Image (spheres, helix red, strand yellow):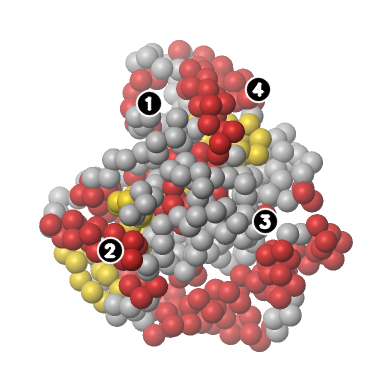
Amino acid sequence: MTPVTIAETNRLIKAGKKTPTGLVEEAMSRITALEPRLSAWVTVNEEGARKAAARLTREAEDGRLRSPLHGVTVGVKDIFNTKGLRTTMGSPIFADNVPDSDAAVVARLRDLGAIILGKTHTTEFASHDPAPTRNPWNTRHTPGGSSSGSAAATAAGMCHIALGSQTGGSVIRPASYCGVVGVKPTYDLLSREGVYPLSWTLDHVGLFARSVGDAEVALSALTGAEKHAASRRAPRIGVPDRFFNEKADTDASEGFRAAVDRLAQRGAQITPFLLPPSFDHAHAAHRVIMSSEAAAVHERLFAREMPRYRPYIRGQVASGLLIPAPTYLSALRIRRIYRCEMARTLNLFDAVATPSTTTAAPEGIAWTGDPAFNAPWSLSGSPTVTVPSGLSARGLPLGLQLAAPPGLDMRLLSVARWCEGALGFDKTPAIE
């Protein structure tokens, strides 16, 4: 598979060499061929996608392209409401749920001319009970979670981009495991309206793409923000002094060092820095906030349907119901201090770099992996991007995670584009 960028696709549609209808048929053929091995999709919207493509093809023939996303194919994580299309939250409780309206970001994509191919698998309620999806690089390994299907579908070339969400590490981790670009924007940059919550304070709407350029086009179209021009200077990149190097396994730590060395060879200024004192409490605060708010989200439904909840989310809600209010409020206070301290640190650099994950994708699909390297940025609300950086000893993707101060999403993506070019990772999954 040779990926075609969104920008190139847009040019081909303008030139009449490709049509939205043709793009949908290509996607459907690929889904048909690969889905039996990957299980990336809960529902494939064949009829709806073809109708939308026919309409958008007529518009293109009349010279009316709605945006750079006109005709671009999209997978949507199955916690985002889609009008007239089943939205299950990965749970049997919602197996027959058909919303009567779109989530705000889905409606925006439709307005921009993007085509919703269907709903991608999620872990139950975007927590940790795994989806059936498998990793396109090696189907014996997890694709990560909770945005499992979105990451796998993008990596396998089933769609141009896909929507996901992150509360702990649910965009960056699966993107890294599947060897694609993942973007967790600044908190609330993309609307959460119509997205089933796990934790109101921590939930972020994010996206998956096959290149940083595609991610830039998508985020720019969704937000109206201008892309940053290519930087004329190599970036200033900070590297944390602790935690990440201690928690990473040999593959992840050696891969990270090799990636940083390549960036330095291309001229990047690499500077070690001290993590702020509040970082030591970040993971504990994240766990308390996430469990407390998950319990609040699910309290009434849980009282009626508890036996139908899968083990992890059941335990998360049950334990969250026992957390005292003062403990929750203390966690929010730690978050506020941490956000301030981390913002001051991030402002010293163009980006901060860490390994995207503690390991490459673990074997088996019963566990979606460790979000320890991603949760701190979900707590701070800072934008993060993962860029494929290399392969593990077993041939599985590794990623470079970049973070920046809140609100500087497009600048961060321009740094990520520079890093992508410096790293030169051009491998794709062998699955065909």
- Is any atom of residue 17 visible in this view? yes
- Is 314 above or below relative to 390? below
Q: Whole-Å distance between the Cαs marked 2 and 1?
A: 36 Å
Q: In the rendered structure, are the residues bearing label 1 and label 3 in contact, judged by CB atoms less than 8 Å apart?
A: no
Q: Whole-Å distance between the Cαs marked 4 and 1?
A: 22 Å
Mark 3 nearby-residue class (10 Å; few <14, some 14–19, many ≥20): many
Q: Whole-Å distance between the Cαs marked 2 and 4?
A: 47 Å
- Is 131 above or below relative to 432? below
Question: Which marked residue is nearer to the observer: mark 1 or mark 3?
Answer: 3
Q: Toward the viewer: 128 or 25?
A: 128
Asked which secondary structure carries label 3, the reply is helix
Question: Which marked residue is nearer to the observer: mark 3 or mark 2?
Answer: 2
Question: Which marked residue is nearer to the observer: mark 2 or mark 4?
Answer: 2
Q: Label 2: which residue?
A: 254
Q: Label 1: which residue?
A: 9
Asked which secondary structure carries label 2, the reply is helix
Asked which secondary structure carries label 1, the reply is helix
Say how many tags the image has: 4
Q: In the rendered structure, are the residues bearing label 4 and label 1 in contact, judged by CB atoms less than 8 Å apart?
A: no
Where residue 169 appears, as percent x and y from the top left, is: 50, 61
Which comes before the other along the chain, label 3 or label 4?
A: 4
- Is any atom of residue 377 visible in this view? no
Mark 2 nearby-residue class (10 Å; few <14, some 14–19, many ≥20): some
Q: Label 3: which residue?
A: 125
Q: Whole-Å distance between the Cαs marked 3 and 4?
A: 27 Å
258 left or right of 275 in image:
left
Q: Label 4: which residue?
A: 47
Where residue 129 appears, as percent x and y from the top left, is: 65, 58
- Is 220 above or below relative to 11? below
- The image quadrant of residue 237 is bottom left
Q: Amino acid at mark 1?
A: Thr
